[in-house]
């Protein structure tokens, strides 16, 4: 009976953790969308406040998950936490940093809503292109993980060397779906990468 209760608690705990992880991704998506809206100068004050709220929420949930995991899975002398654990910790700290920086900006800038997004038109295009390139790289990496069964690190490495046209040739898709996806992914991705690099060089001149 006790074993059954412990097993049910274990299942409920892992379900709660997975749901909280999904919630952190949702918060990140909403806060980044709000930040994009701010760059586009759409409802600047409202979008900034939304970004602050969901960045804080993401940071709080990340802190809860990290603390809970550390308590439930204490390290022994021969163990270390994985890179994912520290990446998740850094993402939580980054969320708090973003929220604080935006809050400080609202508090210190007079007539914040009338000042615009704080970036010029050229800077806005540069930021949006960079964000689009980063999102496209991450999206492609997730698809390759799903289609080819690679680790995310390997998929990210493959996506970057493909989009930058380096092409070491040490890893290629083996499935038909992976090969077909690569064709479309490379065509559009290399175009986006070229536009991003061109705009970076133009901005730096």
Image (cartoon, rainbow, N blue to C red):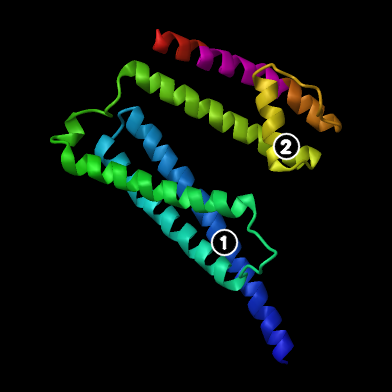
What residue is rendered at 30% in x and 24% in y?
119
Q: Residues within 10 Å of mark 2 (few under 14, many from 20)?
A: some
What residue is rendered at 53% in x and 61% in y?
20
Give me the disc on residue 154: 2
Q: Secondary structure at mark 2?
A: helix
Answer whether residue 195 is magenta in the image: yes
State which quadrant residue 133 falls in. Answer: top right
**Count of all numbered marks drawn on residues in the image:** 2
Image coordinates for residue 184, horizontal then vertical, percent: 71, 21
Image coordinates for residue 201, horizontal then vertical, percent: 47, 10
State which quadrant residue 161 falls in. Answer: top right
Quadrant where the C terminus is found in the figure: top left
Give me the disc on residue 198: none
In the image, taking residue 190 as reference, residue 55 lies left or right, namely left
| Residue that badge 1 annotates | 19
Question: Which range of residues does the magenta coloring cover?
Answer: 184-197
Query: How far apart in space, not on screen, are marks 1 and 2 (Cα)?
Result: 26 Å
Quadrant where the N terminus is found in the figure: bottom right
State which quadrant residue 166 falls in. Answer: top right
For residue 66, above or below residue 106:
below
Q: Tell me the chief SS of the magenta region.
A: helix
What residue is rendered at 81% in x and 22% in y?
169
């Amino acid at each position: 009976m006790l074993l059954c209760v412990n097993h049910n608690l274990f299942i409920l705990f892992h379900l709660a953790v997975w749901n909280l992880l999904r919630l952190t991704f949702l918060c990140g998506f909403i806060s980044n969308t709000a930040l994009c809206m701010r760059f586009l100068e759409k409802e600047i004050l409202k979008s900034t406040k939304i970004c602050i709220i969901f960045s804080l929420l993401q940071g709080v949930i990340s802190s809860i998950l990290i603390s809970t995991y550390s308590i439930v899975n204490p390290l022994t002398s021969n163990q270390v936490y994985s890179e994912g654990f520290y990446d998740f910790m850094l993402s939580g700290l980054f969320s708090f940093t973003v929220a604080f920086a935006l809050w400080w900006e609202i508090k210190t800038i007079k007539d914040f809503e009338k000042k615009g997004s704080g970036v010029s038109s050229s800077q806005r295009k540069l930021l949006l292109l960079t964000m689009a390139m980063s999102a496209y790289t991450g999206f492609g990496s997730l698809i390759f993980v799903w289609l080819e069964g690679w680790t995310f690190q390997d998929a990210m490495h493959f996506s970057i060397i493909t989009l930058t046209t380096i092409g070491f040739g040490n890893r290629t898709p083996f499935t038909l779906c992976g090969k077909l996806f690569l064709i479309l992914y490379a065509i559009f991705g290399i175009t986006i990468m070229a536009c991003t690099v061109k705009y970076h060089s133009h901005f730096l001149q």
